[in-house]
Amino acid sequence: MIAATAAGAGLLVCHACGLLSRLPAAGHHPACARCEASLHERKPDSISRAWAFLIAACVLYIPANVLPVMETGSMFGAQSDTIMSGVVYLWTSGSWPLAAIIFIASIMVPGSKLMALTVLLVSAQRRSTWKPLERAKLYRVVEFVGRWSMVDIYVAAILTALVQFKALATIKAGPGAIAFGAVVVLTMFAAESFDPRLIWDPLKRTHG
Ligand SMILES: [Zn+2]
């Protein structure tokens, strides 16, 4: 069922240039013969690095949702909005599509990514053999979504333009926006640190 792997055949692939090298004798620090990048079978300290980024992202997810992301001031007074109060405001004022986009992009997607990465990390750490194909696909979704996370920043920019156009108001990003940006970036780093091959390693050992 499982095909031969490079590591199983005593070979290493260079992460920088793709050259296949033979695993050197123990004690030698392996380096690529062509580009001199250091070689490793798996991303070094993949799980602990991913946990560090993930925990930081989870901690910042709280201020991102509790602190105001937007502070608007107009001649009628100042107002500050969290992501959720902004969604509620848009929903009650009839902008349902915009409310839905912001709810999905700012609350659901980042929250689901944090949960998905937790599942991936816990299962990889415990060397679980549970549903590897589904977990590999889950990782690809998380990685794919990461590239589009900044869509939310564009939504915020468009929103800013709309508010300024309509109400002659001043609008600035609140501290929650900084926390939110940090959550997005840290989650991308966590996904990048995780080595998806760790999903398949326990199976290789079981199947021999
Ligand atoms: Zn190389």
Image (spheres, rainbow, N blue to C red):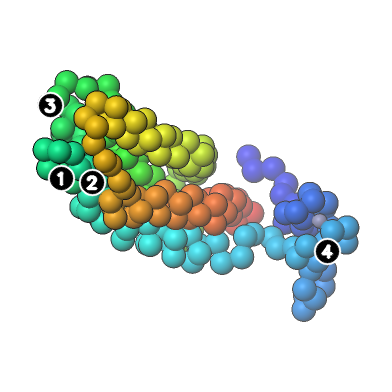
Distance between the alpha carbons at the discs numbered 3 and 1: 19 Å
Q: Earlier in the sequence, mark 3 or mark 1?
A: 1
Query: Are the residues flagged by discs 2 and 4 in contact, CB closer than 8 Å?
Result: no
Distance between the alpha carbons at the discs numbered 2 and 1: 7 Å
Q: Please, what is the three-letter code of the amino acid marked with disc 2?
A: Glu
Q: Is residue 103 left or right of residue 13?
A: left
| Helix, strand or loop for disc 2 | strand
Residue 133: x percent and y percent? 51, 39
| Helix, strand or loop for disc 3 | helix
Does label 4 point to a residue whose CB lies under 8 Å from ligand 1?
yes
Distance between the alpha carbons at the discs numbered 2 and 3: 19 Å
Res. 71 mark: 2
Return the residue nearer the eye: 89 or 72.
72
Picture residue at 48% right of the left edge, 49% below the top: 188
Query: Are the residues flagged by discs 2 and 1 in contact, CB closer than 8 Å?
Result: yes
Q: Which residue is mark 3?
A: 92
Q: Which residue is mark 1?
A: 78
Query: Are the residues flagged by discs 3 and 4 in contact, CB closer than 8 Å?
Result: no
Mark closer to the observer (1, 4): 1
Res. 36 mark: 4
Q: Is residue 123 in view?
A: no
Mark closer to the observer (2, 3): 2
